[in-house]
Image (cartoon, rainbow, N blue to C red):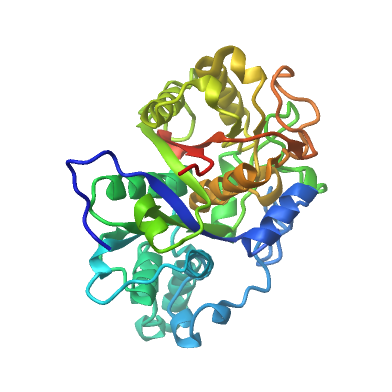
Amino acid sequence: MSPNDERGPRRRVVITGAGVVTAIGSTVEDYWSALLDGRSGIAPITAFDCSDLPTRIAAEIVDFDPTRYMSRISSRRMDRFSWFAVAAAAQAMEQSKLTVDEGKGHRLGALIGSGYGANIAGIEAVERLRERGPRGVSTGYAIGGSPDNPSSEIAMLYGAEGPTGAIITACATGTTCVGEAMHMIREGRVDAVIAGGSDDPITRLDVAAMSNVRALSRRNDEPERASRPFDRGRDGFVFGAGAGVVVVEEAEHAMRRGATILGEVIGYGATTDAYHATAPHPEGRGSQRAIRMALSDAGITPSEVDYINAHGTSTVLNDSTEIAAIRAVFGDHASRVPISSQKSMIGHLIAGAGTVEMIATLKALATGWVPPTLNCDDPEDPELNFVPNEPQRHDVRTAVSNSFGFGGHNAVLAIRRWEP
């Protein structure tokens, strides 16, 4: 790995590896196949007793064996969100075939964010402290209880001695980490970054809290129909667990080593609404600016976008605001471009959402298939193509992936099919 000559043209940035852990598949191919099949991973919660909660459904990760990706000793010091991140990173690095030569570790970074962090381990630690006293708290929690634990674990596994850490922007986290990784590479600080997001927010505490602010769907009797982005009958989002991680790399570095390139990251926009703790700006000003910034950074016009991977949470406010933002930015082209949301099948992975959805966008670029939005039976805007219930064939050369989070965080990536 070699430093960038800042006097030359802007470094191109590509994706050379991808990995996911979701309720519908814990490899990219299984995940993609399930998306095209329209298979929902949302079901009644099994991890804890939720019989007295208003919401009793989620997209859980069940029967996950962390020792497929790490030693048993390592797994015992990690929360489940770290398991998922390490597993997704292992898949991405295996596909990328990126290795670090001796003395070149400083050219590889890792940015893995989480919205909820080690919430499961934290709840268990508090219970142990209360029941057994100070000596009952696991020493592993001192390490695994940190939100930056995945980045440090991944750095140790792959020799990433460059910048590492956890960037947290709520539901936009995964997208933010990839976007900031792109900037690090463009600036010549590193040649590659392992980037993404991971979360497992499905705890009794967090489901109760989010239910109390009426953000979650209460369609408990029809879990597979509960997440319905852009549908007039939506009543809230559904929690999902999982992670998405990609290897972001400088293009020439990737080509020199013969890597397979999955797509090019050509633009990134990040803004903040500075309006409300949970509600987006009613006119979508922040999300509009983020989309425009990504397009401007990419040097493309709205009419060049062939697919929009929507944030599409299935909440009344988010979906209506995202529609308004898309209408404002894309104008007449909005009715011609397919728009879909994977949250209808995998739930909302919070920090993991942006990268997992970007990986679906990469697959759309590669295959010409756009994944559907399940349960979009009565669209709020009938003139827009939300790809309802069935995948569609489209020639996707350039796409946009949106992520908008609580606290007004907005992050958008523009991605293009690789063309040397």
Between 65 and 418, the one nearer to me in the picture: 418
Where does residue 419 sit, x and y in percent of width and height? 49, 42
Where does residue 125 sit, x and y in percent of width and height? 44, 74
Quadrant containing the N terminus in the rendered view: bottom left
Q: Is residue 116 above or below residue 393?
A: below
The answer to whether residue 145 of the structure is visible from this angle is no
Quadrant containing the C terminus in the rendered view: top left
Where does residue 392 sit, x and y in percent of width and height? 76, 36
Q: Is residue 302 above or below residue 347?
A: above
For the view shown, which residue lies furthest in the top direction?
A: 332
The answer to whether residue 152 of the structure is visible from this angle is yes
Q: Can you tell which quarter of the image residue 21 is in? A: bottom right
Between 276 and 318, the one nearer to me in the picture: 318
Answer left or right for 124 relative to 241.
Answer: left
Answer left or right for 103 relative to 65.
Answer: left
For the view shown, which residue lies furthest in the left direction?
A: 7
Where does residue 177 sit, x and y in percent of width and height? 39, 49
Answer left or right for 103 relative to 148.
Answer: left
Q: Can you tell which quarter of the image residue 183 is in? A: top left
Q: Is residue 210 above or below residue 125?
A: above
| Circle count | 0
Q: Residue at x 57, y 46 (%)?
A: 362
Answer left or right for 63 relative to 302.
Answer: right
Q: Is residue 284 above or below residue 354?
A: above
Between 203 and 352, the one nearer to me in the picture: 352
Q: Residue at x 54, y 18 (%)?
A: 330
Between 160 and 25, the one nearer to me in the picture: 160
